Image: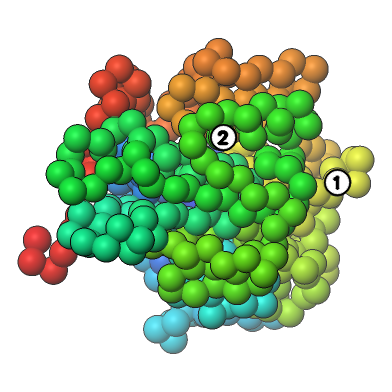
Amino acid sequence: MNGTAHPHRVVILGAGFGGLEAARRLGNQPVDVTVIDRSNHHVFQPLLYQVAGAALDISQIAWPIRHVLHRFKNITTLMAEVEGVDAAGKTVQLTDGSRIPYDTLVIATGSTHAYFGHDEWAQFAPGLKTLGDALSIRQHLLSVFEQAEREPNPVQRQKLQTFVVIGAGATGVELACTIAELAREEMPGDFRQLDTRQARVIVVEAASRVLSNFPETLSDYVLQTMRQLGVEVMLNCPVTECHADGVVCKEKRIDAGAVFWAAGVRASPAAQWLNVSADKAGRVKVERDLTVAAHPDIFVIGDTALVEQENGKPVPGLAPAAKQQGQYAAEVIKTRLHKRPAPGPFHYRNYGNLSTIGKHTAVVDFGKVKLRGRAAWVVWALAHIYFLIGVRNRLMVALNWLWLYMKGERAARIILSRKT
């Protein structure tokens, strides 16, 4: 692919599902791979809400990138932040001013929270994308209950233990249900002045139903189950104001002790780095082989990419999709290295859609086969355990879920302070 003496250099930006999969597929190949991520760990994002809800510890869903890739001697890992890409000079610029040259670039930098033009809401309604987000939410959640225990005014006490989750996608539903279970089933009896069963968990959603990417029958089942758990759901209710002590929805003010954001995401600034057009979510529209138009040496995958399927619909921003794209990009790179015919266009294989509603039930959409209830939860649990890295983590998560299921006790209810 190049006429220089050095081995072909592949730089991968981001060690999420897509970037990590691409790196592993290129391991032990005749190519120098450099993985750059601003964190030193890979995190299993689908279970972040369980860290936020004190069900799992961070070590059970996150792994050091260096350890994951240590057996591949041709892979170098750098903890650094990217500032830009010089496509003409074929270098990646880091925030410390250094530049990393590449022959092939894979951009898998994911997405972050989107506040739809109200970025000032971020300080009042944190989202859930990183381990830091999960720990911050858990810290705030548990601290509010501690504050409510000391509050003598019953009106103020009720306000403190009112939690608003903005957005009824998978993250919003899962986070709201885990908060409701924590307050209503697992914490009563721990406090003397506070009855945590009186906590209110409110989900506000601008659309007409929850989990709108699922079939309507499953969506209706989720709504019914959420209400059985004690979660209040307000549909067709876009948020117009967000403050430190609550939100305004349809001109109705909801006072709250904590507000959490799960309403939307936007892609990383890859489109700006490459000076190419993007959709309204900031995603780079890529070719059928996941490369950028006019830049066949640059792949964009995962949440950063807009990948259209044969039916014209975009590939969903799910972990399996990102892994498939990482695998495909690595395969294209290998065929180029070995001068073999390129594989056909990327084809997304939809293995189904899964979402849990608390610790007892879930919904699963496999197309013709749809499951709900406890059987769906077993499928959901097995699928998530399978995708975890390492036997130890699979075993620890399974045991934690079994203990939570049987005893209703969460071991990660620790509040960190500067003193601790």
Q: Amino acid at mark 2?
A: Arg
Rendered view: 185 above or below 88: above
Is residue 67 at all visible to an observer of this figure? no
Residue 373 image-quadrant placement: top right
Which quadrant would the N terminus be assigned to in this image?
Answer: bottom right
Mark 2, secondary structure of its residue: helix
Q: Amino acid at mark 1?
A: Lys
**Pointer 2: what residue?**
227
**Rendering coords of residue 378 (x, y %):** 50, 17
Q: Residue extending furthest bottom?
A: 97
Residue occupying the point 71% across, 33% down: 219
Taking depth in this image into account, of 404 and 44 the one nearest to the observer is: 404
Residue occupying the point 34% across, 39% down: 197
Q: Tell me the mark number nearer the camera, choosing from 2 and 1.
A: 2
Q: Is residue 69 left or right of residue 27?
A: left
Which quadrant would the C terminus be assigned to in this image?
Answer: bottom left
Residue 54 image-quadrant placement: top left
Number of numbered tags placed on the structure image: 2
Which of the numbered marks, if any, corresponds to residue 313? 1
Rendered view: 213 above or below 76: above
Q: Is residue 46 left or right of residue 333?
A: left
Rendered view: 325 above or below 86: above
Q: Earlier in the sequence, mark 2 or mark 1?
A: 2
Q: CA separation, marks 2 and 1?
A: 32 Å
Residue occupying the point 80% across, 61% down: 285
